[in-house]
Image (cartoon, rainbow, N blue to C red):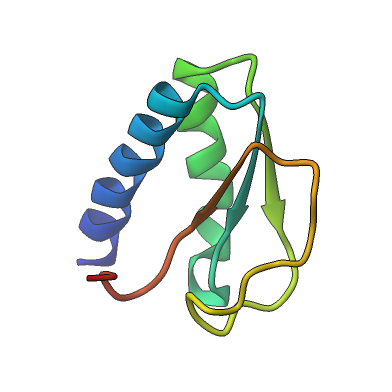
């Protein structure tokens, strides 16, 4: 089930990159999804090789835990649960 959910959210990420055309993207993953970072990176690079993709290695305690960083055109947060 987690694989299916990640696949669905990956499509949202690819759509956001296509729509907003960022040069730099910061991806925030909860600890349970951090092992999937390489898979996400590979899929993004296939379609958008020029986009600089960075993964936040710090804590992630939910959607309200936004990294206090700058220098990115797009911030994407993955989670275990669907945000409504």
- Compared with 49, 69 (above or below) is below
The residue closer to the viewer here, 10 or 12, is: 12
31 or 20: nearer the eye? 20
26 to the left or right of 7: right
Instruction: Return the x and y of residue 36 as percentages of the image width and height.
Output: 50, 55
The N terminus lies in quadrant: bottom left
Residue 46 to residue 67: above or below: above
Q: Is residue 68 left or right of residue 48?
A: right
Vertical relation: 29 (above or below) 59: above
> Which residue is at a point 71% across and 41% down the rendered structure image?
72
| Quadrant of the frame with the C terminus | bottom left
At 38% across and 25% down in the image, what residue appears?
A: 19
Figure quadrant of residue 10: top left
x then y, percent, for residue 15: 33, 31
| Residue lying at 63% horizontally and 70% vertically, measured from the top left | 66
Measured as percent of width and height from the top left, residue 55 is found at: 68, 51
Please provide percent x and percent y for residue 38: 58, 44
Q: Nearer the viewer, residue 2 or 16?
A: 16
Q: Within the image, what quadrant is residue 61 found in?
A: bottom right
């Amino acid at each position: 089930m987690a694989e299916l959910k990640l696949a669905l959210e990956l499509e949202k990420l690819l759509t956001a990159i296509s729509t907003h055309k960022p040069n730099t993207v910061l991806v925030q993953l909860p600890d349970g999804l951090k092992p999937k970072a390489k898979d996400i990176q590979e899929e993004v690079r296939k379609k958008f090789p020029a986009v600089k993709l960075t993964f936040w290695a710090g804590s992630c305690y939910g959607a309200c835990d936004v990294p206090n960083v700058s220098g990115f055109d797009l911030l994407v947060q993955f989670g275990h649960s669907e945000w409504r």
